[in-house]
């Protein structure tokens, strides 16, 4: 039979009161730690906000918008209920930052929602305004179109934006121009390996509903009306960039001019793959020789 002291020790150490005492000590230690870090607590707000975003993208399935709103309301309730104490204020604020990050990611996903092509379509007529013209090399170019019409698809199934690769000779277009062409389009591709780069996710937030290649020449689209204001502004910037590129190449002909244009305006069409590899090797060699 255990002694009175042993019985009392077992009762108070392992029973409910022992657990309560341990919880009080833990809360007191946490409060002291938070008090010591009080001047740096605000730095954790963006970290917790980012953790909420990562939690959203780590879920196996898409949560409902109502669930994100309920999470924010619950976190706000915790914050308001616990604001009377310093520890409760910190815990409530942390919950609110996490919930705000989660809800922001969900809201951004909803705001970017646009139709996505569900199957491959061959020889379809694409009509749209040129948003971006990207020369890839001397033989190929890529254009991004703000879609006006896509074959016989109804508006509710028509992607907001598509990207098409074409021969450079048949892709002489300018930003803001309304064009028409025949193309083969596919839905944005899924990751080719588990946990690999998800182009489909990137395309979703870019409102890019299809990618593919042109099967005909690009023609000017008559009767399209005036391009959206954003495209007109971007067209003016693109023309300025073309002028800057021309001045650079006139002053620095050859490889040096192409590299300068790429660094200043992002125009990389004149740089060959061999030059890119050579520059990468030189950069790595310089970094390895630099002192630690």
Image (spheres, rainbow, N blue to C red):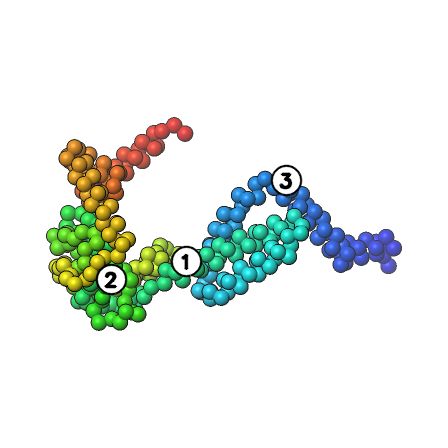
Check disc 1 and report the residue beneath it. 108
Q: Tell me residue 206's x, y (percent).
A: 33, 56
How many numbered callouts?
3
Q: Could you give the CA–CA distance between mark 1 and mark 2, rounded to whole angstroms?
A: 22 Å
Quadrant containing the C terminus is: top left
Check disc 3 and report the residue beneath it. 36
Answer above or below: position of 240 versus 292.
Answer: below
Secondary structure of the residue carrying numbered label 1:
helix
Horizontal placement of 59 versus 132: left or right? right
**Foreground: 248 or 28?**
248
| Label 3: how many Cα within 10 Å (few below 14, some 14–19, many 20+) | few
The disc placed on residue 137 is: none
| Residue at point 28%, 53% (across, down) | 230
Answer above or below: position of 245 versus 91.
Answer: above
Q: Earlier in the sequence, mark 3 or mark 2?
A: 3
| Residue at point 37%, 55% (across, down) | 196
| Label 1: how many Cα within 10 Å (few below 14, some 14–19, many 20+) | few
Secondary structure of the residue carrying numbered label 3:
helix
Is residue 268 visible in this depiction of the protein? Answer: no
Answer above or below: position of 134 versus 203.
Answer: above
Q: Nearer the viewer, mark 1 or mark 3?
A: 1
In which image quadrant can residue 177 be found?
bottom left
Q: Earlier in the sequence, mark 1 or mark 2?
A: 1
Check disc 2 and report the residue beneath it. 147
Horizontal placement of 85 versus 189: left or right? right
Q: Assess whether mark 3 and mark 1 are in contact (beta carbons under 8 angstroms).
A: no
């Amino acid at each position: 039979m255990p002694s009175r002291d042993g019985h009392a020790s077992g009762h108070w150490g392992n029973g409910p009161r022992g657990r309560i005492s341990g919880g009080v000590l833990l809360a007191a230690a946490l409060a002291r730690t938070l008090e010591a870090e009080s001047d740096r607590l605000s730095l954790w707000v963006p970290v917790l906000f980012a953790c909420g975003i990562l939690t959203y993208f780590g879920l196996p399935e898409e949560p409902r918008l109502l669930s994100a709103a309920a999470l924010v309301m619950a976190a706000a309730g915790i914050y308001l209920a616990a604001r009377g104490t310093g520890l409760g204020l910190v815990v409530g604020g942390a919950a609110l930052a996490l919930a705000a990050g989660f809800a922001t990611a969900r809201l951004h996903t909803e705001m970017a929602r646009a139709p996505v092509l569900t199957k491959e379509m061959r020889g379809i007529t694409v009509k749209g305004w040129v948003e971006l013209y990207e020369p890839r090399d001397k033989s190929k170019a890529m254009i991004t179109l703000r879609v006006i019409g896509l074959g016989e698809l109804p508006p509710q199934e028509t992607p907001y934006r598509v990207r098409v690769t074409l021969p450079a000779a048949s892709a002489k277009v300018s930003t803001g121009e309304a064009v028409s062409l025949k193309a083969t389009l596919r839905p944005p591709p899924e990751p080719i390996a588990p946990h690999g780069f998800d182009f489909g996710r990137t395309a979703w937030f870019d409102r890019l509903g299809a990618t593919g290649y042109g099967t005909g020449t690009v023609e000017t689209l008559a009767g399209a009306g005036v391009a959206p204001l954003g495209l007109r502004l971007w067209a003016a910037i693109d023309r300025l960039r073309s002028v800057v590129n021309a001045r650079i190449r006139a002053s620095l002909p050859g490889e040096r001019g192409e590299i300068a244009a790429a660094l200043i305006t992002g125009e990389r069409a004149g740089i060959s793959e061999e030059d890119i590899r050579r520059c990468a090797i030189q950069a790595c060699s310089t970094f390895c020789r630099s002192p630690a």
